[in-house]
Amino acid sequence: MIGVFDSGSGGLTVLKALRETFPAQRFVYYGDHGNAPYGNRDADTIYALTVASLARLFELGCSLIVVACNTAAATGLRRLQQTWLPAHYPDKRVIGVIVPMVEAMSGVPWATGLDSRSRSGEKKTVAVFATRYTVESRVFVEETKKRAPHIDLVQQACPSLVRLIEANAPVHDLRRAVRRYVALLLRRLGGQPLDAVLLGCTHYPLVADLFEEVLPDGVEIFSQPQVTSDSLVDYLARHPEFAGSEDSGITFYTTTSPGPVTELARRFLGDDNVRFLAPPCANAMVHVSR
Ligand code: DGL
């Protein structure tokens, strides 16, 4: 059984692509809506919430978890993989969404350092839109620099966007927010041409059309659902033991009241059978103040 984790509903964008690619696979989706958004919180809190959520998913029987949340991954997915996992769940695995995205954008699949291939690339300007925490962590900048130092990665934080999406805000509010963030970025670029954009938060594919409306023509937009699904295909080919052999299907858990979350998920996934549940032993859940 494969777990898909996000702070809220953004991971549904990744789950949708996974469901299409792996129709026979059993998934469990876990949205920590009760503590979302993570992106305006500090590193220690995000890390603690992430670890608690991953532990819940492992206790529910997952052997592999896709962390479909950039903000959670930005607090130190590598640290988590190298220390927390071996200490607590040595047979389980966790994979993220940031490195596959940078690999897809840069065309450099492995961290090759400053080798001749990376140096020889064409100069490019790429923008990443992400939560405040992801931007402050500079994880996209560092992962890009390792693979393709000729790419100038410009970051733009969008601190209100996840909250608006989670609140099911009217489209004109979402459009206003997206326009403001794109305008801030373009002003900083001061006329320098933009080649591509990364939507570096799994919530943003839900408003990808609004980004498209205002980005200059010809700017390529990379978003994580398909990239993550391709990377899982590759991972399971190398580690088939994590594919699981249960019946297909998806169970949805949330740490908030299931009603409104279920409604958004049904609309987004186009599936009236979706029903979010409270995780078993809900009293063991972690809640921190906003
Ligand atoms: N979907 C999460 C991400 O990819 C949103 C983070 C948040 O809760 O602010 O970063």
Image: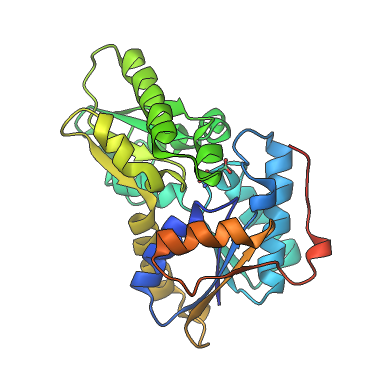
Residue 195, percent from left and from top = 22, 31
| Extreme residue toward the right, this view | 283
Decide: is 251 above or below 222: below
State the quadrant of the N terminus. bottom right
Residue 104 visible in rendering: yes
Residue 268 image offset from top left, x and y in percent: 41, 58
Q: Along the horizontal axis of the image, is 189 left or right of 88?
A: left
Query: Which quarter of the figure has residue 219?
Result: top left
Q: Residue at x 52, y 35 (%)?
A: 131
Q: Nearer the viewer, residue 71 or 276?
A: 276
Residue 65 lies, in percent from the top left, at 56, 65
Q: Closest to the observer: 59 or 273?
A: 273
Residue occupying image coordinates x 35% and y 35%: 114
Residue at the top extreme, as displayed: 190
**In which quadrant of the rendered image does the C terminus lie?**
top right
Residue 63: quadrant of the picture: bottom right
Residue at x 27%, y 46% (from the top left corner): 107
The residue at 58%/56% (across/down) is: 260
Q: Position of residue 116 (x, y in %)?
A: 26, 38
Which quadrant of the frame does ligand 1 lie within?
top right
Q: Nearer the viewer, residue 177 or 263?
A: 263
> Is residue 119 visible in the rendered structure shown here?
no
Q: Name above or below for residue 196 compared with residue 95.
A: above
Q: Is 142 left, or right, of 187 in this rendering?
A: right
Q: Residue furthest left?
A: 218
> Residue 218 falls in which quadrant of the image?
top left
Q: Decide if residue 233 is on the left or right side of residue 275.
A: left
Relative to 260, is 23 on the left or the right?
Answer: left
Q: Nearer the viewer, residue 105 or 71?
A: 71
